Amino acid sequence: MRILLVEDDEKTAEAVSASLNNAGYVVDHESDGKEAWFKGDTEPYAAVVLDLGLPGMDGLSILRKWRQAGQTFPVLILTARGNWDERVEGIDAGADDYLPKPFQTQELLARLRAIVRRSAGQAAPVITIGEVSLDPRQMQVSVSGVPIHFSPQEYRLVSYLMHHAGRVISQLELTEQLYAQDFERDSNAIEVLVGRVRRKLGVDLIKTRRGFGYVIGTSES
């Protein structure tokens, strides 16, 4: 999944980016408020981690503009401001959760997993479809209880499809969510990736909707 991290403190941004990458996310980082607003308004992110104190445009203004424009991706506010009234203001502006600094990385990842699940209509921490289970906390996919070894890219594919079970996902959307912006992609990269994942799963989980994309967990499955 592709995450936008908006943070102007270099050390914090580096640490959070590394943690998100290690947790299986593709991360875009912006330190300027106006640039962050533009990216969030034009790029398809699964979620945003947003600092409030930013140059160019403050985080609350960015969030309000996104919500007014109809952007629905979940937003986790990350800030040094700890006053309860500022937290209320952030939630009222459209934030899904609020984490004051200093914070533990594991808590940030847990809160991010939770808002991503909720935005996709998934309540349980472990997503199970048929014989296949996805545990985002452990970054583990299992078939009938047996863990399957996936590369980071293969795991991202299964994770994104299972978080959006029942919805047909186009190759373009998968490309945008699985690869960094500067990654050179082959035209058939997604087809090859899906083929590898299907072989490793050994079950008929990922369906092809020709001309549209791929889907997991429809009534037609």
Image (cartoon, rainbow, N blue to C red):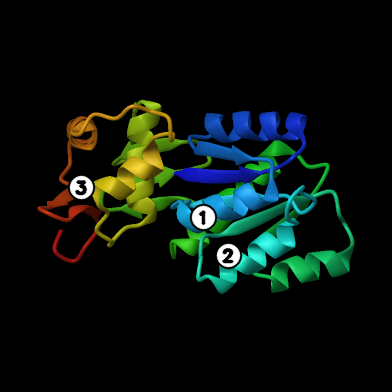
Which circle's residue, 3 or 2, is located before the other in the chain?
2
Q: Is residue 91 left or right of residue 145?
A: right
Q: Quadrant of residue 75?
A: bottom right
Q: Residues within 10 Å of mark 1 (few under 14, many from 20)?
A: many
Residue drawn at point x = 69 percent, y = 50 percent: 33
Amino acid at the residue labelled 3: Ile
Compute the Cα span from label 1 to label 2. Answer: 17 Å
**Nearer the N terminus, badge 1 or badge 2?**
2
The kind of residue on which mark 2 rests is Trp
Q: Quadrant of the N terminus?
A: top left
Element type where label 2 sits in the image: helix
Return the mark for residue 66. 2
Is residue 101 placed above or below 202 in the rendered structure? below
Disc 3 marks which residue? 206
Q: Residue at x 51, y 60 (%)?
A: 73
Residue ID for mark 1: 116
203 is higher (above) or lower (below) than 119: above
Q: CA distance from mark 1 to mark 3?
A: 21 Å
Name the image quarter holding residue 182: top left
Q: Quadrant of the C terminus?
A: bottom left
